[in-house]
């Protein structure tokens, strides 16, 4: 494994379709991942996440296979066009469980600095904890 890769695994009681909706629907994304979400859910589609305290981060959708797989890239800097800043690759994979739930695998790669890697490692812990809360309500 690349030392600058973030990998997270979460088990949900929720069905894959419910988890898929939470990671792809702008209204649901805004409840757990930032304060605002835009997403054109198709390969090549533009997207963005906005945090009140951090700003707007441009994204580009690469792969959409409802469920189980979503891949997008996002820039390292707020307020810049996707083409104008370094980007990391975020892969979401959903695996159905025998009990009707879902295992979510998240992998982010392509970090250029240790600082950015550390920031996103902690950031994912916080954001994914909010996803767990959303899907257990």
Image: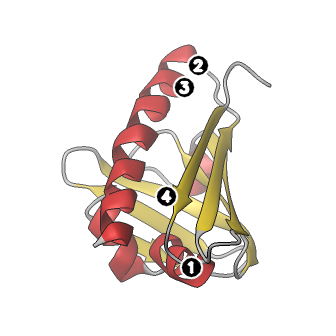
| SS class, disc 1 | loop
Residue topped by disc 2: 113
Q: CA distance from mark 2 to mark 1?
A: 36 Å
Residue, far front: 99
Q: Which mark is residue 117?
A: 3
Total residue callouts? 4
Q: Nearer the viewer, mark 1 or mark 3?
A: 1
Label 4, residues with CA under 10 Å away: few <14, some 14-19, many ≥20: many
Image spot of residue 134 (x, y percent) = 32, 68
Residue topped by disc 1: 15
Q: Residue at position x 69%, y 37% from top?
A: 109
Of the two numbered discs 4 and 1 on the same chain, state the one appearing first in sequence.
1
**Residue 36 seen from this side:** no
Q: Are discs 1 and 3 less than 8 Å apart at CB? A: no
Residue topped by disc 4: 58
Q: Residue at position x 57%, y 55% from top?
A: 82
Q: CA distance from mark 4 to mark 2?
A: 19 Å
Q: Quadrant of the N terminus?
A: top right
Image spot of residue 96 (x, y percent) = 70, 72
**Residue 48 seen from this side:** yes
Q: Nearer the viewer, residue 108 or 103?
A: 103
Q: Are discs 3 and 2 less than 8 Å apart at CB? A: yes
Q: CA distance from mark 4 to mark 1?
A: 29 Å
Of the two numbered discs 1 and 3 on the same chain, state the one appearing first in sequence.
1
Tell me if residue 120 comes above or below residue 16 in the rendering.
above
Q: Nearer the viewer, mark 4 or mark 1?
A: 1
Label 1, residues with CA under 10 Å away: few <14, some 14-19, many ≥20: some
Q: Nearer the viewer, mark 2 or mark 1?
A: 1
């Amino acid at each position: 494994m690349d030392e600058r890769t973030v990998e997270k695994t979460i088990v949900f009681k929720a069905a894959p379709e419910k988890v898929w909706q939470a990671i792809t629907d702008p209204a649901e994304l805004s409840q757990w991942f930032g304060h605002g979400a835009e997403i054109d859910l198709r390969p090549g589609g533009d997207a963005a996440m906005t945090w009140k305290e951090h700003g707007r981060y441009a994204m580009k959708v690469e792969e959409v296979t409802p469920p189980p797989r979503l891949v997008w890239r996002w820039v390292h800097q707020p307020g810049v066009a996707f083409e104008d800043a370094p980007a990391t690759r975020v892969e979401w994979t959903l695996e159905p469980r025998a009990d009707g739930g879902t295992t979510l695998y998240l992998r982010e790669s392509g970090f250029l600095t240790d600082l950015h890697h550390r920031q996103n490692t902690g950031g994912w812990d916080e954001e994914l904890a909010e996803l767990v809360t959303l899907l257990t309500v």
